[in-house]
């Protein structure tokens, strides 16, 4: 009887345990299916219960059950976090990849290129011109010049100029265009004309007077969607591979009438040229491409292309007479793109500046003059501005500039003349501190020095005078 009772008791206990186990599983199942919104609250209550807080005292079995439940639930939370992390990471990657694709789609595409034809057909030239034209722009400038009047004295006149540019890149906010320095030097305002004949104002981003190169910029926000869909960035070629007799195509704003196309051949390589711009400044260019493709006033800064349609030069000038006065025909010159690339890249990276207001105008405190071409040749003096005198206690004096120094660069922008220095200063406000590069005579040769100068106020200079 006792054995039967014992077995019944054991059986009852087993049933109770089984029922508790089933109940525990049901509870766990119910807890597992709870909404995520209540999980944190449940966890907090369980932790609180395990620490002895609350009105009820938990048995060892219940504590063990809760611990097991917590471990499982935290495991689920961690697993979900890992899964969410993977999903979130994948989502971010997907968004970034899509953004990159969109950004790439918003980028201006490059001009199409073709396989160079062995035949010298007009259709080949037409194809090259058609492909390259979206990357070539017209440049119109306005500058102020002083002219002596009939009755004595001088008067200022606005003079319009024309040139050409080639689209070579873009950044987040700007379209970047290469041209010649002599096209934009002294310009008080610039405008750019695109292939669809729309016109947008532009700013000078940087100049390299020594190599007669410049980069101007147009704000992307100023360019219409229709125009953006039509313009392209020039495909760059390798000017080092040019051969004598190779056919080339020149595109430019000849005579300011709009884009025109000429074709010819590479008639010489590594030519040197000395030319004088409209301001009377002498430009000594070396290593030029000589071509019989017609290059006329207004073509400056335009594209010289090979028969693949790749940019291999920036048109610079034509030659009408020799040093002896002999008249010549069909000789034009272009700056090889391989020679120009490093300079253009540096100019593209410069900060675009706008002219400062009159009350912010700056000065450096020197009396100076341009180094003439004769002085450069006879005395091996660098091109730039020679310092004739330094204003006492002025910005230049405080920077360590001395009489006789040749100023060749201001804030990374080359200086070849006093007019160029004055033009550059129009973009800098009084109080700015910038680097200024001077060439200083030392035992018969010139040594480059970089000084730091804090620009003074032009108004203070006028007051002191």
Image: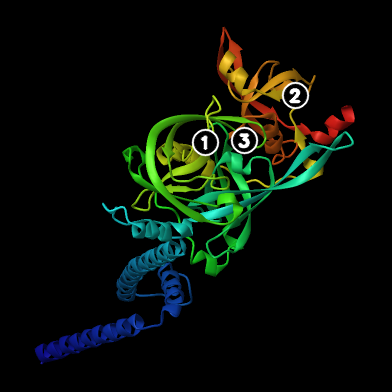
What's the colour scheme?
A: rainbow
For marks 2 and 3 on the same chain, the one whose residue lies earlier in the sequence: 3
The residue wearing badge 3 is 277
- Local packing at callout 2 (Cα closer than 10 Å; few below 14, some 14-19, many 20+) is many
Instruction: Tell me the residue at 24%/86% (across/down).
Output: 22
Q: Is residue 339 left or right of residue 73?
A: right
User: Is residue 195 depicted above or below 382 in this figure?
Assistant: below
The residue wearing badge 1 is 319
In this orientation, does residue 193 appear?
yes
- Of circles 1 and 2, the one toward us is 1
- Residue 122 falls in which quadrant of the image? bottom left
- Local packing at callout 1 (Cα closer than 10 Å; few below 14, some 14-19, many 20+) is some
Instruction: Tell me the residue at 52%/62% (across/down).
Output: 195
Q: Can you give x and y, in whole percent of width and height, for residue 255 in the image?
A: 59, 50
The residue wearing badge 2 is 366
For marks 1 and 2 on the same chain, the one whose residue lies earlier in the sequence: 1
Instruction: Tell me the residue at 54%/68% (across/down).
Output: 225
Q: Quadrant of the N terminus?
A: bottom left
* Nearer to me, 409 or 289: 289
- Of circles 3 and 1, the one toward us is 1
Q: Can you give x and y, in whole percent of width and height, for residue 313 in the image?
A: 43, 43
- Of circles 2 and 3, the one toward us is 3
For marks 3 and 1 on the same chain, the one whose residue lies earlier in the sequence: 3
Q: Quadrant of the C terminus?
A: top right
């Amino acid at each position: 009887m006792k054995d039967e009772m014992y077995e019944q008791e054991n059986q009852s206990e087993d049933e109770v345990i089984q029922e508790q186990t089933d109940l525990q599983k049901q509870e766990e199942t119910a807890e597992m299916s709870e909404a995520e919104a209540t999980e944190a609250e449940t966890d907090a209550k369980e932790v609180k219960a395990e620490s002895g807080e609350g009105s009820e005292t938990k048995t060892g079995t219940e504590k063990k059950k809760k611990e097991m439940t917590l471990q499982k639930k935290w495991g689920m939370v961690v697993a979900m976090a890992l899964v969410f992390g993977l999903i979130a990471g994948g989502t971010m990657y997907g968004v970034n990849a899509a953004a990159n694709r969109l950004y790439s789609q918003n980028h201006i595409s490059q001009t199409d290129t073709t396989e160079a034809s062995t035949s010298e057909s007009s259709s080949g030239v037409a194809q090259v011109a058609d492909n390259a034209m979206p990357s070539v722009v017209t440049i119109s400038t306005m500058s102020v010049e002083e002219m002596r009047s009939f009755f004595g004295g001088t008067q200022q006149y606005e003079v319009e100029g024309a040139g050409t540019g080639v689209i070579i890149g873009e950044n987040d906010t700007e379209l970047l265009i290469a041209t010649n320095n002599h096209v934009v030097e002294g310009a008080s305002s610039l405008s750019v004309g695109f292939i669809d004949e729309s016109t947008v104002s532009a700013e000078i981003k940087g100049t390299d007077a020594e190599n007669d190169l410049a980069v101007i910029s147009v704000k992307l926000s100023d360019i219409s969607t229709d125009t953006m869909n039509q313009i392209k960035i020039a495909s760059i070629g390798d000017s080092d591979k040019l051969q004598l007799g190779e056919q080339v195509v020149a595109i430019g704003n000849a005579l300011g009438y709009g884009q025109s196309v000429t074709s010819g051949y590479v008639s010489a390589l590594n030519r040197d040229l000395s030319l004088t711009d409209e301001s009377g400044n002498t430009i000594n260019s070396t290593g030029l491409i000589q071509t019989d493709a017609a290059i006329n006033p207004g073509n400056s800064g335009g594209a010289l292309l090979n028969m693949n349609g790749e940019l291999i030069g920036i048109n610079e000038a034509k030659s009408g007479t020799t040093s002896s006065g002999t008249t010549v025909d069909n000789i034009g010159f272009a700056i090889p793109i391989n020679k120009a690339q490093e300079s253009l890249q540096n100019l593209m990276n410069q900060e675009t500046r706008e002219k400062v207001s009159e009350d912010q105008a700056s000065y450096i405190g020197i009396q100076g003059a341009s180094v003439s071409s004769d002085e450069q040749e006879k005395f091996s003096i660098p091109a730039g501005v020679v310092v004739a005198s330094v204003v006492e206690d002025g910005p230049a004096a405080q920077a360590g500039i001395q009489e006789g120094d040749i100023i060749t660069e201001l804030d990374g922008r080359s200086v070849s003349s006093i007019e160029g220095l004055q033009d550059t200063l129009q973009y800098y406000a009084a109080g700015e501190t910038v680097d200024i590069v001077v060439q200083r005579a030392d035992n018969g040769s010139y040594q480059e020095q970089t000084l730091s100068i804090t620009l003074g106020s032009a108004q203070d200079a006028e007051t002191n005078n």
